[in-house]
Image (tube, grey):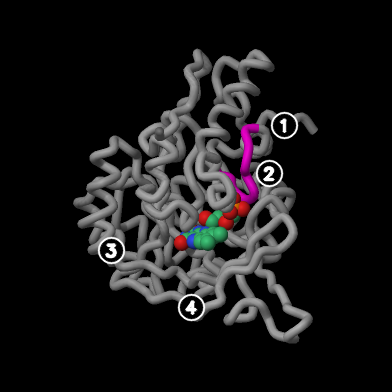
Amino acid sequence: MARKPRHTNVNLAVNLGGLPMKNPVTVGSGTFGAGMEYADFVDVAALGAVTTKGVSLNGWEGNATPRIAETASGLLNSIGLQNPGVAHLKEVELPWLAAQGATAMVNVSGHSFDEYVAVIEALEDAPVAAYEVNISCPNVDAGGMTMGCHVPSVEKVVRLCRAATKRPLIVKLTPNVTDITEIARAAEAAGADGVSLINTLLGMAIDARTRRPQLARVVGGYSGPAVKPVALRMVWQVANAVSVPVLGMGGVSCGTDAVEFMLAGATAVAVGTANFANPTATVDVIDGIIDYCEQYGVTDVNELIGALEC
Ligand SMILES: Cc1cc2nc3c(=O)[nH]c(=O)nc-3n(C[C@H](O)[C@H](O)[C@H](O)COP(=O)(O)O)c2cc1C
């Protein structure tokens, strides 16, 4: 039976840049589909939001296989934003999420500035609570991370998306830059209501026996428990650099991980790769936050945000 978080008197509600969330837990885009495959395990309506897999205007086939490699404490992927396109999302997944009573945050992809805008425009009459603009995917040759590494292109894409919608706009940042605070500040200045981080770290895996890379694309995005210290550091730096809220992610798999991200300055967290190993990870994380709050006398989860004592 689909699990819900346990009952608590702790206030779990947070506001992520204009997106009201009943608790501070969503999913990492691309690790949860639009929730349908997880509906036997967790009540998707009980999550703070369901962040959908990156969507483009006409759908993309993704990269050649193999495009997943397991490493110690982490996962490498080079999926390449495979998706069936925005019309399918509107016709199938978004109505399903709405029928479940779930809060939908749509992760928006594009190969060009115009494509990001076109995806948002196509979704403006759909049941979408917020957009997460993905300018951080390392697995595509145009758009994605190529746009998210330089201040002028970050400013341009965020400004264009901002003009296309009044809905909350969360901009997803890549860790594959020298100074992530510079990119976060550019996103904020261009009109972002919040920033999310981190997307995957560029990595590679080699098979010594065949002397070949394990991924067809050679390099891919690294995620899972191994990246948590990098993600925490970046969330802390960004939270101290901007005034918009931060959605933190990177290796979150239990309640304590989530609390650590909130102490570092995150308003909410996303559970990503952990969903693959444990399909109830999202609810386990919410229950773990409740456990922490009850144990330490925290009556409102908002007290945790940025409460790190240095
Ligand atoms: C298989 C896979 C697919 C992903 N697809 C997307 C995507 O479509 N859009 C996006 O913004 N991030 C995508 N990500 C990145 C995750 O949302 C998240 O930022 C990253 O994996 C770090 O969190 P984690 O360590 O909890 O997985 C993907 C990650 C994985 C592992």
Seen at 68% across and 70% down, the residue is 203
Question: Residue sitting at 28 percent across and 53 percent down?
Answer: 93
Which residue position holds label 3?
A: 86
Q: CA distance from mark 3 to mark 4?
A: 19 Å
Q: Residue furthest bottom?
A: 211
Q: Are marks 1 and 3 in contact (CB under 8 Å)?
A: no
Q: CA distance from mark 1 to mark 3?
A: 40 Å
Check disc 4 and give the amino acid type: Asn
Magenta extent? 246-255
Which residue lies under the disc numbered 4? 63
Q: Which mark is residue 308?
A: 1
Q: CA distance from mark 1 to mark 4?
A: 40 Å
Horizontally, is 185 left or right of 213 in the view? Answer: left
- Of circles 1 and 4, the one toward us is 4
Residue at 50 percent across and 70 percent down: it is 79
The location of residue 48, given as percent across then percent down, is: 43, 35
Q: Nearer the viewer, mark 3 or mark 2?
A: 3
Q: Quadrant of residue 248?
A: top right
Disc 2 or 4, which lies upstream in sequence? 4
Count neighbours of disc 3 (C-alpha within 10 A) and say few if under 14, some if 14 to 19, many if 20 or more. Answer: many
Residue 287 location, x and y as percent?
56, 27
In the image, what residue type sits under mark 2? Trp
Q: Which mark is residue 236?
A: 2
Kindly state the secondary structure of the residue where label 4 is placed: loop
Indicate the secondary structure of the residue bearing disc 2. Answer: helix
Of badges 3 and 4, nearer the viewer stands 4
Q: Earlier in the sequence, mark 1 or mark 4?
A: 4
Asked if labels 4 and 1 touch by Cβ distance under 8 angstroms, the answer is no
Q: Marks 3 and 4: CB-CB under 8 Å? A: no
Q: CA distance from mark 2 to mark 4?
A: 33 Å
